[in-house]
Image: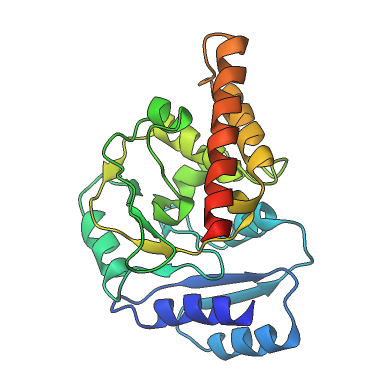
Amino acid sequence: DCDAFAKTLKSIRIQNQSLKHVVIDGSSNEENQKLIASSSGDAGSVYMFQSAKGIYSAMNRGLGECQDDELVLFLNAGDCFANSESASQVVADSSNDGVDFLIYPCIFGESNGFIPSIERVTAKNVARGKALVCHQGVVATAGLIRQAGAFDETYSISADHKLLLSLLQISKVTLSSIPLAVVSLGGVSDTKCGALVRENSRARAETGLAFNSRIADKSYTFLRLMRCKAKLSLRKAL
């Protein structure tokens, strides 16, 4: 989607903080490739093409371009920073010694959209759906992300969820109340509810955060699936 990528690129270019940005192009059309080429001259820009291997393969490849001490944020085409000072906010928030993992709220859909609270963020609360965190609001050093296992490419939709659960268990998180990004709606996590809920259940199990009983886990998984489908139906109706 050329328009979606243009939106993301513009939000990077207007930041009042210089950024290194890595673009991983999976299978774009000619129009998109021209737009990407126009960004290759931006300071700190890195562009790579890879055959379509999935979003998490692309994220891991981008991570490979980052030094251990560099703070990393992953945005999908269509996502954008909340405002021109978002990157500067991250720099300020990470200025204290030992800060290598931060979580910010995200805005859903548009700049005036819904902003879920992250006040209750813990590994357990995230695992059980009591705190909603998007990868567009997660900033961590490349070294810490690698330590947590990076993105598990055996997942198709919830590797970012598994990574978040791992990060919350191995590092102290710094929480902010200031939204960092506007998240584009309509991605796979919005449209493939069944896969999302099943993979989230798998992520809980593989990070040691599964429910105490298989029956409880299945019941929770079923309820989350029903809620997810209900939200999707409402969005389509609107």
Q: How is the image coloured?
A: rainbow
Residue farthest front in this picture? 237
Q: Residue at x 26, y 39 (%)?
A: 119
77 vs 172, left or right, is: right
Q: Position of residue 29 (x, y in %)?
A: 74, 82
Residue farthest right in this picture? 51
Q: Quadrant of the N terminus?
A: bottom right
**Residue placed most toward the observer, 174 or 230:** 230
Q: Position of residue 52 (x, y in %)?
A: 77, 63
Is 106 drawn above or below residue 49 in the view shown?
above
68 vs 15, left or right, is: right
27 vs 152, left or right, is: right
Q: Residue at x 41, y 45 (%)?
A: 133
Q: Residue at x 66, y 60 (%)?
A: 58
Q: Position of residue 23 (x, y in %)?
A: 58, 72
- Kindly indicate the quadrant of the structure image that contains residue 172: top left
Q: Is residue 150 among what the camera can see?
A: no
Figure label count: 0
Is 207 drawn above or below residue 54 in the view shown?
above
204 vs 155, left or right, is: left
- Kindly indicate the quadrant of the structure image that contains residue 136: bottom left
**Residue placed most toward the observer, 152 or 217:** 217
Is 95 drawn above or below residue 210 in the view shown?
below
Q: Position of residue 105 (x, y in %)?
A: 33, 52
Q: Residue at x 53, y 56 (%)?
A: 235
Q: Is residue 149 among what the camera can see?
A: yes
Is 145 drawn above or below residue 171 in the view shown?
below
